[in-house]
Structure formats: structure tokens, C-alpha cells
């Protein structure tokens, strides 16, 4: 009896680790092959199998070429600018909105909350057909600030995160501050906002990733080459370099590395954000 | 401004302090709501209304419009490429089911003690963070004739002539593309499920262990019930998600060779062919499908699961319902 139990648990261990190792390999192989290819010279790329190791992992030539050909410096610069503005705005707007919706009762409150919830259902890319028309008539097409405004305007993630967080902040905090003569603005900026730190980090990470990876609107609203963001810069590889995968892989890796570093630093918070989404659902 | 002044006057009788607080509250509400609401109206509801309006017109972005009634909607259902796109999304739905199954499986494995858990988790989650365009390139390379996948298969002894053209062969290319979505999202789903499983009170596991429950019992009686609702939610979301699949076909095959999804076709109609009215009608049809799914989900949760409330645990609700049912049955029998 004991022996059988041991056998079952041994089998379970094998199944567990075996499946996890296979899954990990499946996740990593497509990216790892890219790493191998990105370090190969043109001749090596043409003559060796894609699974062969490159001669040297110090051959950064492809990265330099990819960086220049796709004008990625410009892309990084534009993306960084967009990130700073959009993230700042979405943290403040999201937290302020959540504060008002969570702490005050006023006519129209339910309606506003429902309007935001319903907005989350509207399919993003489909909406761009008419948003484009509005952007065009407002003269916001082909300006970095126009793109920033679109990203702020279609932001539901941070609102959700902040609304959820406010639920768990005791209202007695507000009340005692008010008793001490604090204004409502003071309550928000001095008392509550510093307490929102975990929610701010979560929303910065989730929103940050989605902005960094955003392609569709960027492609639609930023048409001049000097306005390209990192994802549209990467997309230029579909053209003349369609088959030079050693350049393409280098380009892909350049875009991945910043987010990989960020992820490794903030792993716990990223998972936390995902799990929070799960509990909400 | 005028509004807050009016409020101040009407609140006069309530005393100085209260009055000023009411005014203040009003000010806070107005200033804090102004920007988000303005953006919501301009970039969500105005475009939404325009979308409804445009869907009845034959028009381009610039130039005259012509009212055509329901023609665009009739077109949506009659154009072969749009119908084909709906069929293509079935592949992505299948992919979503596979992905949920895998995520559920791996999350369950992770709930039990795993050495090197963080490495497995990170490796599987990371694809979710890669931008869709980069994922597209990675798999364009992966599937290209004679490249990564083919070399791997050859390594395992398959002959080149037995290997299909992953992206050109119409019987297989949509599987290949849907698989990239599975690759990208399984880890994220897993983390979500794991989060829900971890939110189960640890005492429950301990109590179960004391009662002699083995791993299988733990899975069936504790883990599965704790994530039932999120699994169903994700299944329903996967319907609208599959209809919205865009980046894999857009980057990898550009929607050629029968891989055009709904959004790829819509994108082409709207921005290349400038058939704005038709694209809007497509968007409305999609929205209706999404709303139907959401309603179905709400109904499903209301009738199939009782989610319990803060005062009453799920188990308590179930017990109460069971007793009510019994009572009703007895009543029915008596009658």
C-alpha cells in the first residue's frame, strides 16, 4: 500500500517537472533561436543551419545595423516621451476619477461608472475607424501629442485598478483628515495619493507594457518617419529586409531587452497585477 | 463655476462649515471628472455614435456620403471574404480553448510545491510582454521554409518533403497562426488562474490534508471550484478575443492565403479601400456579438453559479438553495 502511494507520487513528480520543462522549452526556443541568429554575420546566416551556434556572441554588427536602418533611436525617444506623458496622465486621471466615484455620492455617479464599464466592451481596433475621422477633423493626426491623447482617452485599465484599490482604503482616513481641517483636495493629494503606491505601480506596469507594445494607433496616427515609435520602427523590417532574418532578429531583441529587464525587476508586481485582474473577473 | 455657486446658495441654511464643504465637494467632483469624462466622450462615445451613423452610409473619409440604409449590413453577411474571416476566427477560438486547458494544467502543477517555480513562471509568462509585432517576426522566422521549426523537425528525423509549408498550405496555416496566440497568452492565463487558486484560504488545504485528501481530491474539491468562474469568464472572453485577433496574420502572412481575420479584413476595408461605411457596419456586428457574449456570461453566472456575498459564503448559499429546493420539492410532492 505504502509502496503504491510512493510510486504514484513519484509519477506525479515526473509528470509535473516533465510538463513544466517542456512548456518552458516551448516558450523559450522561438526567442532563443532569434538570439542565435542575431549574432550571425551575413555569410554565416546564409551558410549555417538556424540551430547552429554563431561563431561569436560578440558580433554586434547586426544590432548596430538594425538600430540604424529602422531608426530605432528615434523610436525609443518617441516611445519614451509618449510613455512619460501618457503614464503620468493616466495615473492622475485614473486615481482622481476613482476617488470621486468611490468616495462621493452625486447624481449621475452610477451612470458615469457604467459608461466607463461599457467602454471596456467596445472593440479597440474597430473603434479606430471613426476615431481616425475625429482625430483628422481635430487636426491631431501626425502629431505626437495627438497620439498621446488617443492613448489617454482609451484608457480603462488604470481606472479599474484604482477603483478596486479604493474599495479597500478605509473611509475613516478621509474623515479624520477632514476633521483636522483638511480640504478634499488635501485629502486626496496628501493622504490618499501616497497610499495608492501599490496600485500606481501596478497600473504603471500594465499600462506601460501596453503603451510600449502599442502598434495599431501608432501606425495610424504617426505617419511621418520621424514620428515612429518603437513598434512601428520594428515593423519597417517587413519591407526591404523581409528575408534578412539576422537583422530582423536583432531588431526584435532590441525591442525586447528593455521590457525583459523591467520584468525581471518587477516580477512580483506584474504577477500581482495579473492576479488582481483575475480576482476582479 | 455657475453650478457650484448655485449649490452654495441653496445650502445656506445648513450652517457655514457644512455649506463650504458641500461647495468643496462639488468642486472636487467637477475638476476631477472633467478631463476623464471629456476624453471618454470624445474618444469613445462620439466615435461610437459616428460608427452607428456611418454604418448606414456609403462613404470615404473625405468626400460626400450617400445614405444606403441597411446595405452595408447586408454586405457584411454576403461578402465571401468577411464570412471567411468569421470561419478563420474559429481556429483562434480553438486555440483559446487549448490555451485555457494548458494554463489550467500548468497553474495546477504550480500550486503544488515546485522547485525553481519562479524560473518556470517567468519563462512561460514572458511571451505575454513581447510586442505583437515582435511576436509576428519571431514566428515568421520560426515557420519559414527550412528555418527553425523545419530544422527542429529534421533533427527529430522528419524528412523535408514530409514537412508542410506552414504558412502557405491552407489546410494548416491558420493552425500555425493560432498557435502563436497560444504561445503568447498561455503564461498570462496561467498566472491569472494561479492568482485565483492562491486566493483560497490556506486553512482549507490544511483541513483537507488532515482529512486525508490527496492531490487529486485537492484539485477536484478545492482548486477547481475556486477558479470555476474565472475559467468560464475567460472562455467567453475568448470568443470576442478570437474575433479580434489581428497581429499574427497581419505581420506573418498579411492576411493572404486565407488567413485574414475579421480585424485584418476590417482594417483593409477601412484604411486601404476606404469603405468606411462597410467597416463601421462590421464593427457594429462585432460589437453586437461581444454584447451577446457578455450578456450570456452574466446570465451564466447568475443561474449556474451562486457567487455568494460578503455575509454568506458560497457554501452557505449552496446549502440554503439546496434546502429551498428540497422544501419546494416536498411542496410539489404534497400538491
Image: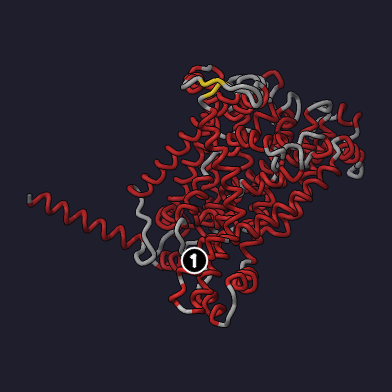
Residue A224 location (% of width, % of height): 81, 34
Q: Residue at 40% of width from left, 42% of height from top?
A: B295
Which corner quadrant holds the N terminus of chain A?
bottom left
Q: Is residue B154 above or below residue B3?
A: above
Residue A186 location (% of width, % of height): 62, 73
Residue A48 location (% of width, % of height): 85, 30
Q: Is residue B291 above or below residue B66?
A: below
Snapshot quadrant of residue A147: top right
- A64 sits left or right of A173 in the view: right
Instruction: Please give the chain letter of the residue carrying mark 1.
Output: B
- B246 sits left or right of A62 in the view: left
Residue placed most toward the observer, B111 or B46: B46
* The furthest residue to the bottom: A180
Q: Is residue B279 above or below residue A65?
A: above
According to the picture, the residue beneath numbered tag 1 turns out to be: B7
- A17 sits left or right of B323 in the view: right
Q: Residue at 68% of width from left, 46% of height from top?
A: A149
Q: Is residue B255 above or below residue A219?
A: above
Observer able to see residue A54: no
- B148 sits left or right of B323 in the view: right
Q: Residue at 16% of width from left, 51% of height from top?
A: B329
Residue placed most toward the observer, B269 or A255: B269
How packed is label 1: few (under 14 Cα within 10 Å), some, or many (20 or more)? some
Residue placed most toward the observer, A164 or B255: A164
Residue B192 location (% of width, % of height): 55, 52
Snapshot quadrant of residue A272: bottom right
Secondary structure category for the residue under label 1: helix
Observer able to see residue B247: yes
Amino acid at each position: 500500500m505504502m509502496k503504491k502511494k510512493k510510486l504514484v507520487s513519484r509519477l506525479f513528480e515526473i509528470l509535473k517537472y516533465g510538463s513544466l520543462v517542456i512548456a518552458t522549452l516551448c516558450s523559450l526556443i522561438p526567442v532563443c533561436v532569434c538570439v542565435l541568429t542575431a549574432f550571425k554575420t551575413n555569410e554565416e546566416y546564409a551558410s549555417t543551419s538556424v540551430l547552429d551556434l554563431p561563431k561569436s556572441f560578440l558580433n554586434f554588427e547586426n544590432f548596430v545595423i538594425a538600430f540604424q536602418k529602422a531608426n530605432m533611436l528615434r523610436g525609443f525617444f518617441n516611445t519614451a516621451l509618449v510613455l512619460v506623458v501618457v503614464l503620468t496622465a493616466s495615473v492622475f486621471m485614473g486615481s482622481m476619477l476613482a476617488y470621486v466615484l468611490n468616495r462621493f455620492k452625486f447624481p449621475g455617479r452610477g451612470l458615469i461608472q457604467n459608461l466607463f464599464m461599457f467602454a471596456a466592451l467596445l472593440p479597440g481596433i474597430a473603434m479606430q475607424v471613426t476615431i481616425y475621422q475625429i482625430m483628422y477633423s481635430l487636426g491631431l493626426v501626425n502629431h505626437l501629442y495627438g497620439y498621446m491623447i488617443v492613448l489617454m482617452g482609451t484608457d480603462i485599465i488604470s481606472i479599474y485598478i484604482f477603483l478596486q484599490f479604493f474599495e479597500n482604503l478605509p473611509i475613516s482616513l478621509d474623515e479624520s483628515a477632514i476633521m483636522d481641517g483638511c480640504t478634499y483636495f488635501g485629502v486626496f493629494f496628501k493622504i490618499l495619493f501616497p497610499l495608492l503606491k501599490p496600485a500606481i505601480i501596478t497600473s504603471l506596469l500594465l499600462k506601460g507594457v501596453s503603451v510600449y507594445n502599442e502598434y495599431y494607433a501608432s501606425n495610424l496616427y504617426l505617419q511621418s518617419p520621424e514620428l515612429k515609435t518603437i513598434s512601428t520602427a520594428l515593423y519597417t523590417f517587413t519591407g526591404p529586409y523581409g528575408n534578412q532574418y539576422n537583422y530582423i532578429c536583432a531588431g526584435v531583441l532590441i525591442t525586447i531587452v528593455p521590457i525583459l529587464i523591467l520584468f525581471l525587476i518587477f516580477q512580483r508586481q506584474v504577477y500581482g497585477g495579473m492576479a488582481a485582474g483575475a480576482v476582479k473577473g | 463655476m455657475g453650478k457650484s455657486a448655485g449649490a452654495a446658495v441653496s445650502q445656506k441654511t445648513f450652517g457655514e462649515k457644512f455649506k463650504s464643504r458641500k461647495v468643496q465637494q462639488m468642486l472636487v467632483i467637477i475638476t476631477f471628472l472633467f478631463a476623464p469624462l471629456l476624453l471618454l466622450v470624445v474618444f469613445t462615445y462620439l466615435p461610437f455614435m459616428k460608427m452607428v451613423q456611418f454604418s448606414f452610409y456609403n462613404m470615404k473619409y473625405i468626400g460626400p456620403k450617400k445614405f444606403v440604409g441597411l446595405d452595408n449590413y447586408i454586405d457584411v453577411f454576403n461578402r465571401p471574404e468577411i464570412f471567411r474571416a468569421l470561419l478563420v476566427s474559429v481556429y483562434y477560438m480553438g486555440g483559446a480553448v487549448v490555451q485555457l486547458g494548458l494554463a489550467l494544467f500548468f497553474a495546477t502543477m504550480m500550486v503544488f510545491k515546485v522547485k525553481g517555480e519562479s524560473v518556470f513562471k517567468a519563462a512561460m509568462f514572458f511571451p505575454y510582454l513581447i510586442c505583437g509585432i515582435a511576436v509576428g517576426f519571431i514566428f515568421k522566422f520560426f515557420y519559414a521554409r527550412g528555418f527553425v521549426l523545419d530544422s527542429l523537425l529534421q533533427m527529430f528525423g522528419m524528412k523535408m518533403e514530409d514537412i508542410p509549408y506552414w504558412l502557405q498550405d491552407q489546410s494548416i496555416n491558420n493552425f500555425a497562426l493560432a498557435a502563436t496566440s497560444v504561445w503568447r497568452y498561455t503564461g498570462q492565463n496561467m498566472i491569472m488562474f494561479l492568482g485565483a487558486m492562491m486566493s483560497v484560504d490556506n486553512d482549507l488545504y490544511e483541513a483537507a490534508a488532515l482529512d486525508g485528501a490527496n492531490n487529486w481530491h485537492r484539485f477536484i474539491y478545492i482548486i477547481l471550484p475556486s477558479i470555476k468562474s474565472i475559467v468560464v469568464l475567460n472562455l467567453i472572453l475568448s470568443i470576442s478575443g478570437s474575433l479580434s485577433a489581428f497581429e499574427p496574420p497581419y505581420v506573418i502572412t498579411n492576411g493572404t492565403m486565407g488567413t485574414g481575420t475579421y480585424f485584418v479584413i476590417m482594417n483593409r476595408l477601412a484604411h486601404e479601400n476606404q469603405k468606411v461605411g462597410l467597416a463601421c457596419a462590421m464593427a457594429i456586428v462585432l460589437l453586437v456579438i461581444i454584447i451577446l457574449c457578455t450578456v450570456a456570461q452574466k446570465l451564466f453566472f447568475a443561474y449556474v453559479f451562486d457567487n455568494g456575498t460578503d455575509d454568506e459564503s458560497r457554501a452557505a448559499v449552496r446549502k440554503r438553495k439546496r434546502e429551498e429546493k428540497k422544501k419546494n420539492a416536498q411542496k410539489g410532492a404534497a400538491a
